[in-house]
Amino acid sequence: MSYKQQADIFKRTFDLKYAPIAISFTNHEASGDIYGKISICKAIKLASQGENFIIDEDTSACPGGSTYCGFSGIHAGAKKRRLQEFLTEGEKLTSSIVSFERMQKLGVPPATDLAEKIVITPLEKAVLRPDMVLFLVNAEQVCRLITLDTYWDGLSPEQQIIGALCYQAIVYTIMSGKTNICVGDWTARRHQGFEKDVIFMSVPYERIHNLIAAIPCCSAGDAEAVIPEEFRSD
């Protein structure tokens, strides 16, 4: 099944407003568009509307995104002190340098030096095999997708719901190999103008085939629910 066929199934089954996004980390040549410097959270927003991006060390505009996604090393010394001050006194997203340190150390590690490039593109336009697929969906769509994602194994994914949007929506799934449901960080949501009901669901690409295979079998997909008489309410 082609990537376009997969995208068409998702759009048709779930009436998606935004395109499913294919995200690939690569060291090879890739096709896409580079519009000067851009933050990864903005690329997510625009890719969901049909645009294509190749982001590398030179075009990643956000220092935090560059660190989480592997284009720069983890901050230490004076750089870390500035970051601590920015997040606690500037963005005011965490109360202290201690809570910031917990956020940094208790999750999966950043994707340090993982790849030279990240390709962020609508799934229907993907050329490279995606490492993951990112959905921008509402609560009902998340409910259906997560039901399908867990249909075969019944295993609830562990969640990462704090930290930068690129960390929650991309890096956690890339580094853990687990599906994630998150809401992103407040700064990214506000600056990029994500709609109030948008939830981010990240699925490792290796789980996509089984998710699609569950659609005709599961009532969260296309299957008709059959309710025995003794379970029906008046």
Image (cartoon, grey):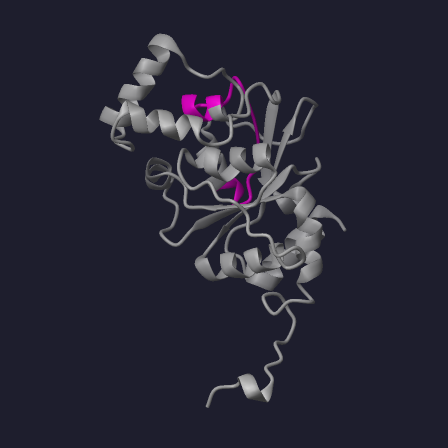
Residue 17 forms part of the magenta stretch: no
Percent position (x, y) of residue 211?
Answer: 66, 55
Return the residue nearer the eye: 191 or 138.
138
Relative height, residue 187 to residue 203 (above, below): above
Q: Quadrant of residue 119?
A: top right
Q: Is residue 217 visible?
A: yes
Q: Residue 93: x percent and y percent?
A: 29, 33
Q: Where does the image place residue 165, in percent across and percent down from the top left?
A: 43, 36
Task: Inspect the magenta stretch and tell me whether residue 59 lies in it.
Answer: yes
167 w.r.t. 123: above or below: above
Asked whether 161 or 114 is in front, the reply is 161
Look at the picture and state if 231 lies above or below 62.
Answer: below
Q: Residue furthest left?
A: 89
Direction from residue 96 to residue 66 in the image, left or right: right
Left or right placement of residue 69 versus residue 32 in this view: left
Q: What is the x, y in percent for residue 2?
A: 74, 48
Quadrant location of residue 154?
A: bottom right
The residue located at (61%, 70%) in the rendering is: 219
Residue at position x 62%, y 65% in the image: 221
Occupied quadrant, residue 231: bottom right
Q: Residue furthest top?
A: 78
Is residue 2 depicted above or below 80 in this figure?
below
The count of marks equals 0
Q: Which residues are magenta?
A: 46-67
Classify residue 24 as left or right of residue 74: right
Kindly identify the residue that appears in the image at 44 percent across and 50 percent down: 199
Nearer to the camera, 136 or 234: 234
Q: Is residue 62 visible?
A: no
Q: What residue is rendered at 60% in x and 22% in y? A: 114
Query: Residue most toward the right?
Result: 1
